[in-house]
Image (cartoon, coloured by chain):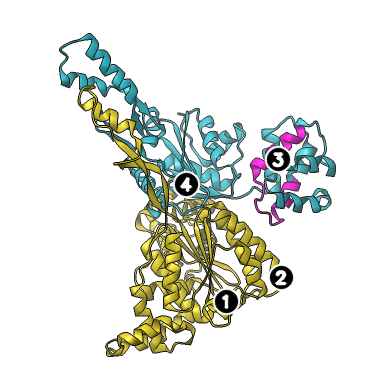
Chain colours: A yellow, B cyan
Amino acid sequence: MTATGSSAPGGGAMPDLALAGFAAALRYAGLGVTADRVQLFLQAVAALDPTLTADVYWAGRAALCSGPDDTARYDEVFAAWFSGDRSHGVARRTPQTSVQAALDEAAEGSGDGDRTLKVSASTTEVLRHRDVAELSAADRAELARLFGTLRPKVPVRRATRQRPSHRGDIDPRRTLRAQLRQVGEPARVHYRRRGVRPRRVVVLIDVSGSMRPYADSLLRLAHMMVQQAPRTVEVFTIGTRLTRVTPALRRRDPEFALRLAGDVVPDWSGGTRLGEVLKVFLDRWGQRGTARRAVVVVCSDGWERGDASLLGAQLQRLAGLAHRVVWLNPHRGKRGYEPVQAGIVAVLPHLDDLVAGHSLASFAELLEVVADA
Amino acid sequence: MNAVGSAGELAGRLRATGYLAGEGLATVGYLALALHRPLLLEGEPGTGKTSLAAAIAEALDLDLIRLQCYEGIDASQALYDWDFPRQILHLRTVEATTSDAAVEEVEKSLFDERFLLSRPVLRALRESPAVLLVDEIDRADDEFEAFLLEVLSTYEVTIPELGTITAEVPPIVVLTSNRTREVHDALKRRCLYHWIDHPGLAREIEIVRTRLPEVSERLAEQVTRSVQRMRDLDLLKPPGVAETLDWTRALDALGADVLDVETAAATLGAVLKYREDTDRVRESLDRLLAS
């Protein structure tokens, strides 16, 4: 396709360049637009009628979108770009989050080069057991470093596929193959056994106001788990709505990953609608398979305003789907804590584990619970 | 295969087989044919992802070759396998009949075409033009996706004993996913993507009328309207188009001409698959059926 002869959906000229510009605008809006996708898009438009708005629209949607979440943003950018008004593309969402703030503080702390050296082993030990909600900015920075000492292990399940082994069932295929090699004479018997595969882990982090002091640390913890098993760990934040932050947490650098996650989550420190949001998770992800036979970790104080029966019902659903349901409650680790709040009471019967989650030591404990699941 | 000239033509041909595709789906489907790209379909269960592949095969008069994915599926279940028992039998026969057969020759005869078990992907490459349906790709493991990506990029497969097999014409590939897991980006990039939504009222009625022409117009409309209302009820498993058809068939089999509270209550099992959903719908059945 060339610039001559074809006219744009808006009426003007519609060269490849304009289409590529549209693709760039999409990339700017956050879609995963790569060079080969742009090429596919151009091919697609050329195969259709580039003078028709609908054809350009569908070609772009098929070539440049990769999920239902993309299509809404695609529509937005498409409308903006082809309305002829290209002066101000589509603005990226501005980052403004509590994690952001916490990170900036943390960065300041670690900028002080001597600090790390001054921290003695005993302080480290103390820090391990301190409640992360009560830390100063400097201690937080030190804690962020200590996170590196955690070693998340991936829980496993038995695989369907069998692998060669020294014990187990006879492997007829390999045995016969060995026999063939010797022109039919009986050969060594080969065995096979089912191997192991990583089990899926789903982490749901409450980012409502009451969990605010812990959200940063919990995301950091989730980041470590994602780094350990990028394909089998899924992380969502829950608050007034459900947000999937796994893609952000796949970035290796923790600070960058957390900042990205901060950009995606729209409801930092808002209210909680735990029951409703869990329902959304189960409807949209959980029941379809994400939670099926997975280890699900819910990180929340279980502070449910209003009726807790919905929350209880959703936990029951979750327990039916998941391999294990672990609830992490920061208050669990505090002296005198009794699980008496309506939310926690409603979920208790459906849990496999209720763990603390207020200090580094308790995070290490959680990782063990998950690994052994 | 008869070439399809435009999206409209594809839609027309699909319609002739009883599959009503919307404008977007027809356009994307046409692109998949024109650009020889695999088509990745996602959407709620029961919106017609799998049946599209069947409809394309029928519309273009091609064979439909289906590969159902599952956890732990590997290349030998998708590509090919050797029929070992028959190979051994062959070997024993050779041994018994000829005393001094050359080892090399015997070995060569063992990896003959007749001992090769073709699995769906290999069949699709050899029998192409054909439609290859890779169903529920999200259930397979990552490794399998990587393998599939390789096949879909080159449309060829190498069998060490036989050599490389290349499709003369790339098969039409339709992948479906229920989004239980995200499909790898590299695979997505190979594909044209389309999200199938539930159809609107008018089109769904038309689908029912097309697929079940023996059913009265009134019943089709009543059933469809009720199902569409059910989708707004916030159910655990909102019914798809497949359920609309099932329900209509069930009512028809019972000889019902109209949908009233009584017949609906008796046949709810055709639409709803959760006790909680059934309870919920039963409560509001009057409102649901009000026209």
Tag 1, which secondary structure?
A: loop
> Residue A232: x percent and y percent?
43, 57
- The first of marks 4 and 3 along the sequence is 4
Q: Is residue A164 above or below residue A197?
A: above
Q: Which mark is residue B139?
A: 4
What label does residue A307 carry, if any?
2
For marks 4 and 3, give the CA distance. Answer: 26 Å
The residue depicted at 82 percent of the width and 53 percent of the height is: B287
Find residue B259 and name its label: none
Q: Residues within 10 Å of mark 1 (few under 14, many from 20)?
A: many
Whether discs 1 and 3 lie on one chain: the answer is no
Classify residue A136 as left or right of residue B263: left
Which of the 4 image quadrants contains residue A101? Answer: bottom left
- Gap in angstroms between the C-alphas marked 1 and 2: 17 Å
**Under tag 4, what secondary structure?**
helix
Q: In this rendering, which labeled residue sits more in front, label 1 or label 2? A: 2
The circle on residue A208 is 1
Identify the residue position indicated by label 3 in the image.
Answer: B270
Of badges 2 and 4, nearer the viewer stands 2
Q: Is residue B1 magenta?
A: no
Please report, as a chain letter, where disc 2 is located: A
Mark 1–mark 4 distance (CA, rounded to whole Å): 33 Å
Could you tell me which residue is drawn at 80 percent across and 38 percent down?
Answer: B218
Q: Which percent across, then down, holds residue B115?
A: 32, 23
Mark closest to the chain's N terminus, 1 or 2 = 1
What's the residue type where badge 2 is placed? Asp
* Amino acid type for the residue under numbered disc 1: Ser
- The amino acid type of the residue labelled 4 equals Arg
Q: Which residues are magenta?
A: B225-252
